[in-house]
Image (cartoon, rainbow, N blue to C red):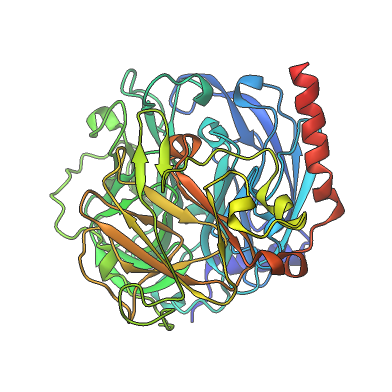
Amino acid sequence: MCYHSFWRSALLLVLLGQQAFTASAIGPGSVLEIVNKVIAPDGIARDTVLAQGTFPGPTIVGRKGDRFHINVVNKLVNETMLTSTSIHWHGLYQHSSAWADGTAFVTQCPIVSGNAFEYAFDVPDQAGTFWYHSHLATQYCDGLRGALVIYDPDDPHGDLYDIDDESTIITLADWYHVAAALQKGIAKSDTTLINGLGRWAGNPTSELAVITVTQGKRYRFRLLNIACDPNYMFSIDGHTMTVIEADGQNTEPLQVDTIQILAAQRYSFVLEANQPVDNYWIRANPNRNNATGYANGINSAILRYEGAPIEEPTTMKTATSNLLNEAALRPLSSSPVPGLPAVGGVDYALNLNMTNNGSYFFVNDAPFIPPPVPVLLQILNGTINAHDFMPNGSVYTLPRNSSIELTMPAGVVGGPHPFHLHGHSFYVVRSAGSEEHNYVNPVLRDTVSIGSAGDNVTIRFRTDNPGPWILHCHIDWHLQTGLAVVFAEDPQGVKEDAPVPGEWKQLCPTYNEQMHINSS
């Protein structure tokens, strides 16, 4: 395998005794300050909730096998956007550290303003593209989100590319001019931000993100949808993309010209800079936004070859001819799918029927409403049976070391819904848009589209990670209105497998005291 520029830089910084891998990246041992700040990424100023005062937040980087220590310091003062917070490390399994998953009222009470809390966890066997975000109400819609990349020194795809560093990370985000808590009706974003910059259709004059490449080089781009709602049709004029990773899982190389990427999904793709030196449009058209299309550079960024003039592209979009099909993705290294090769051929099968009454979503007739006591604390206090958990009807107990199959029929309003499972990656044995079941070599990932009416997306996983793991729609507006369930996986094994630190035990008393003070 080749040695990439990232590792040369990383080695130099290690020799210098630095924690960061690049000038603006942090981790795996870092302080992450959560602050309010007025910014104008699309030319319209608004107050926000940010990590380290930037949007997106600083990239957190590490290597496979690292132990992370991220001390989150809460300096929030704007009550409209909440002064408490919690941080979820999206896609990381948190084996033996369920308490560090960061899901408010599932694995912890929020961190109150003026306090700090250190998330400490090991990443022994994961590498790839992940991210972090607030997991309290709709707070991440107000800005608290950023990339998290774990590099593999022995990347099996290493011979396919020359460059893989912070400059090859591409984040797609929706941006709102009004705070999440003040949105009326169905929220629609005002602007698409690519790497934190974008143009609002109402005044399309602000700066666009520029990604620079050198002709003849091969780049591993890490594409993340860190949006609260829309999915994007992503393409780069004049270039194809070879997908090699989905949600932290290596895949067999698959060439496409367009990627539909739903909220919380990630893909790595190799781009060969083999076109004439010029500027090319990068396009990310949202399915829901106040303005779609590309007029005046909205929903766009610029791919600029070194030596090209500093000007906007004049390239034209061509028709999509090779859209990424999830069912065509194959794992680079196959592993046995849990259970037998037949529908329902598992130890525990569960159908999740989703409905909406105009105000709330329901899963099997129950809306998920955050409980007053986190599910993890309920388990530690002795709750074991599903009917004893809060919120009633939303918590399912799963036996240890068992094969699990979940079916998620589509059709409920607001789709396509991207469903994310904490604590696991899963095998997508039936993808959206397909009627076939693949029990031989389906893609592994942690966030899946359940498609449209008529689809019955089916996933499988094995219960090898005790803890309370939420499964939820990653359209944050839908999670806020009930579209989630929690799996209490092997509750009897949680105390042994996921011991909590003393600081964690203080989160709820401190939060409850603060809420009492604020309400009195």
* Residue 277, percent from left and from top: 28, 53
Asked if residue 381 lies left or right of residue 244, the reply is right
Picture coordinates of residue 488, whole percent (x, y):
60, 59
The one nearer the camera, 83 or 390, is 390
The residue depicted at 24 percent of the width and 56 percent of the height is 455
Give left or right: position of 377 versus 404: right
Given the current orientation, which residue lies at the most extreme front position?
387
* The quarter of the displayed image where residue 254 is located: bottom left
Residue under the image location 42 percent in, 76 percent down? 346
Which residue is at a point 56% across and 45% down the rendered structure image? Answer: 392
What is the count of numbered marks?
A: 0
Q: Would residue 241 be seen by someone viewing this image from the given angle?
A: yes
Q: Residue at x 54, y 59 (%)?
A: 91
Which of the 4 image quarters holds residue 42?
A: top left
In this view, the residue in front, 374 or 43, is 374
Screen quadrant of the C terminus:
top right
Check the image and name the residue furthest to the top: 520
Residue 244's spot in the image, x, y percent?
A: 38, 69
Residue 329: horizontal and vertical position, in percent? 31, 70
User: Eyeballing the image, is 73 above or below 26?
Assistant: above
For this rendering, which residue is in front, 207 or 245? 245
Above or below for 162 versus 39: below
Position of 237 compared to 176: left or right?
A: left
Report the front residue among 286 and 97.
97
Q: Residue furthest right?
A: 502
- Tell me, yes or no, if residue 24 can be seen here: no
